[in-house]
Amino acid sequence: MSTVEFEQPDGTVTAVDATDGESVMRSALTHLVPGIVADCGGELSCATCHVIVGDAWIGVVGPPTGFENDMLDATSEEREPGSRLSCQITVGPDIDGVRVRIPASQW
C-alpha cells in the first residue's frame, strides 16, 4: 500500500491508501474522491481524470508520453507543467505520499 494525496481546489487534502500497481485514478474512484470523473474508466479517451502533480513529484512521476500528451490538450482546464492523466500514473512505493491537485473545472 502507498498513500496518494488529492488536493481539492479549496485546499482540502484527502489522503487515501492506494493499492500498489493500480492507477491513481482507480484509487480516487475507490475512495470516492470528488473531482476525478473518469468517464472512460481509464481507457485514455476522455481526459476527465486530469490532475496536476506537485512540483516536488514531477521528476518521480515523470512526464506524459504519447497519446496521454495529446489528450492533455483536451482537458477542461488549461494544461500546467505538472499536468497528467491520473489513469496513466501507477501507484507504487516510488510515489508513496505523492500529492496531486484536482483542477477547479472538474470540481
Image: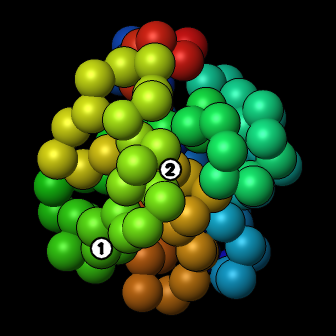
> x, y (%) of residue 71?
47, 44
The N terminus lies in quadrant:
bottom right
Residue 97 picture quarter: bottom left
Check disc 2 and give the amino acid type. Leu
Q: Residue furthest bottom?
A: 93
Q: Which mark is residue 42?
A: none
> x, y (%) of residue 11?
36, 22
Does residue 13 appear to the left or right of 30 in the view shown? left
Q: Which mark is residue 62?
A: 1
| Residue on which the image places disc 2 | 85
Q: Which residue lies at the image location 43% right of the left edge and 76% below the top edge?
A: 95
Residue 99 shows up from this direction: no
Answer yes or no: do the residues labelled 2 and 1 have beta carbons within 8 Å? Answer: no
User: For numbered disc 2, what is the local secondary structure?
Assistant: strand
Q: What crowding class fits label 2: few (fewer than 14 Cα within 10 Å), some (14-19), or many (20 or more)?
A: many
Q: What crowding class fits label 1: few (fewer than 14 Cα within 10 Å), some (14-19), or many (20 or more)?
A: few
Check disc 1 and give the amino acid type. Gly
The C terminus lies in quadrant:
top right
Q: Which residue lies at the image location 40% right of the left edge and 49% below the top edge?
A: 70
Q: Nearer the viewer, residue 88 or 65?
A: 65
**101 lies above or below 53:** above
Residue 1 shows up from this direction: yes
Does residue 54 appear to the left or right of 65 in the view shown? left
Q: Nearer the viewer, residue 26 or 7?
A: 26
Does residue 103 appear to the left or right of 83 in the view shown? right
**41 lies above or below 105:** below
Q: Nearer the viewer, residue 42 or 12?
A: 42
User: For numbered disc 1, what is the local secondary structure?
Assistant: loop
The mark tally for this picture is 2
Residue 103 picture quarter: top left
